[in-house]
């Protein structure tokens, strides 16, 4: 059941009418449904009940403090890729022991901060990182629990920019070289080898790539045990897809059943790092039509949300559903249009060639499935303030990150001390 529904012809998020939020917050803004977040999280919690498994929410999808707090309150661990994400996770109350630190390039200062905080697992992606982590842990008199991320060389069948598990991708250690890396890790005194990790890509809509790569890692785990390593954990990564248009991603329950089958008898604690599947469908981006510009070939609907607020259409040719906040009359004629932002780039569009009933200045529109990789990838390009975030819970809503004022943006910039004021100003 969707939490984004028309009531009396006006789209609501749970019990809150979108125009009421737009009046208070201004547009554009992101809005997240607490009920949808809880429901998505519960699917993972229910599907892993009784399994020796933990679910670490991949914060890169949406690191809003309120979102992370809500998920942490339901028992989520966190998968992080920076010191910044670690600080948000800790501020949200997620215990350090439930944090997995992923990423291909962690700086020594970041590793030190994570070691000092007590982060539970470091997913290491190169021999160089093994050496650095060992050295940093040694300086601090600590021992780091690690998994080594291997690249199983499978094609996840997803967009080229978000596939990660093929030879030639920068991620993980080539599975054929993994035994050497484990041997090195075993010799380093400040590392405790705990397991193997993988993550093969994002927005996967088939379970086959998971099956294929789990089989390969399973074989590796056997070889590593023969080599004398204690492999207690297997981190399967994230990647489960969501619905943007007409995709039919597997249910979380089916995904878990497959993983259970493929890992049967392996005797490992499993880790999952879902991001998009937890937050993607729970969020929308709301914008307002600035003007409509009819053209010879098609009509441009120019809205106040742009590529700097949601870059997925521009970057990945991603398709997001666009809906009017005031429900269109079913008999209204449709016109072919591009929904575009005001940014000075031809690539600044939210949707192209859509047949929508006519919109006019002042109308509100909604971009669906924008909860993942939306606000977190926003920028201030064209000196547009970062888009604010709002959370709805039942009939309540609250701004969880306000729109910075232009004054605040200006105050965050410094002139070199030698620059004189312009004459006449
Ligand atoms: N674990 C690791 C190591 C990852 O690199 C990622 C995502 C995840 C977990 C979470 O994957 P998810 O469950 O969200 O698919 N900006 C792109 C997606 C980039 C994904 C990067 N890694 C997009 O908007 O489609």
Image (cartoon, rainbow, N blue to C red):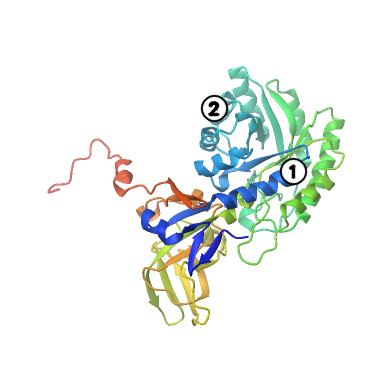
Where in the figure is residue 310, as x and y percent of width and height?
49, 57
Q: Which mark is residue 48?
A: 1
Mark 2 crowdedness (10 Å alpha carbons): few <14, some 14-19, many ≥20: some
**Residue matched to label 2:** 113
Where, by quadrant of the figure, is residue 185 drawn? top right
Q: CA distance from mark 1 to mark 2?
A: 31 Å
Quarter of the rendering occupied by the N terminus: bottom right
Where in the figure is residue 4, as x and y percent of width and height?
54, 61
Report the side of 78 relative to 217 (left or right). left
Q: Is mark 2 within 8 Å of ligand 1?
A: no
Please tell me which residue is depicted at 29% across the width and 46% down the height of the picture: 407
Q: Is residue 380 above or below residue 88?
A: below
Where, by quadrant of the figure, is residue 53 drawn? top right
Where, by quadrant of the figure, is residue 419 drawn? top left
Let me know if residue 66 appears in the view.
Answer: yes
Report the side of 14 relative to 409 (left or right). right
Q: Which mark is residue 394?
A: none
């Amino acid at each position: 059941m969707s939490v984004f529904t028309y009531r009396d012809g006006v789209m609501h998020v749970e019990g809150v009418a979108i125009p009421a939020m737009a009046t208070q917050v201004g547009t554009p803004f992101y809005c997240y449904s607490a009920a949808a977040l809880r429901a998505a999280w519960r699917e993972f919690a229910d599907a892993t009940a009784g399994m020796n498994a933990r679910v670490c929410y991949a914060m890169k999808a949406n690191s809003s403090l309120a979102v992370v707090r809500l998920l942490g309150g339901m028992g989520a661990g966190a998968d992080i890729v920076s010191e910044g994400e670690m600080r948000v996770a800790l501020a949200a109350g997620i215990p350090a022991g439930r944090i997995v630190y992923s990423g291909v390039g962690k700086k020594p200062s970041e590793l030190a901060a994570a070691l000092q905080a007590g982060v539970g697992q470091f997913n290491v992606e190169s021999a160089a990182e093994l050496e650095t982590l060992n050295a940093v842990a040694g300086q601090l008199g600590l021992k780091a629990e690690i998994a080594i991320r291997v690249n199983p060389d499978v094609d996840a069948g997803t967009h080229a920019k978000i596939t990660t598990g093929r030879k030639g991708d920068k991620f993980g250690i080539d599975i054929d070289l993994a035994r050497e890396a484990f041997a090195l890790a075993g010799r380093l005194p400040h590392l405790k080898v705990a397991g193997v990790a993988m993550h093969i890509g994002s927005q996967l809509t088939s379970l086959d790539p998971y099956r294929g790569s789990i089989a390969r890692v399973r074989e590796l785990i056997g070889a590593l045990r023969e080599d004398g390593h204690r492999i207690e954990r297997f981190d399967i990564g994230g990647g489960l897809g969501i619905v943007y248009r007409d995709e039919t991603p597997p249910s979380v329950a089916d995904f878990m059943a497959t993983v259970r089958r493929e890992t049967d008898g392996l005797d490992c604690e499993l880790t999952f790092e879902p991001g998009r599947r937890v937050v993607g469908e729970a969020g929308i981006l709301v914008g307002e039509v600035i003007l409509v510009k009819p053209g010879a070939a098609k009509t441009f609907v120019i809205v106040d949300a742009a590529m700097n607020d949601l870059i997925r259409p521009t970057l990945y040719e991603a398709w997001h559903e666009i809906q009017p906040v005031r429900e269109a009359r079913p008999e209204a004629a449709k016109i072919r249009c591009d929904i575009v932002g005001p940014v000075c780039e031809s690539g600044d569009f939210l949707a192209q060639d859509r047949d929508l009933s006519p919109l006019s200045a002042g109308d509100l529109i909604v971009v669906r499935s924008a909860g993942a990789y939306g606000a977190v990838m926003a920028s201030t390009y064209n000196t547009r303030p970062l888009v604010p975030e709002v959370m709805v819970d039942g009939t309540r809503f609250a701004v969880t990150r306000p729109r910075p004022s232009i004054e605040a943006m200006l105050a965050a910039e410094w002139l070199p001390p030698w620059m004189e004021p312009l004459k006449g100003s």
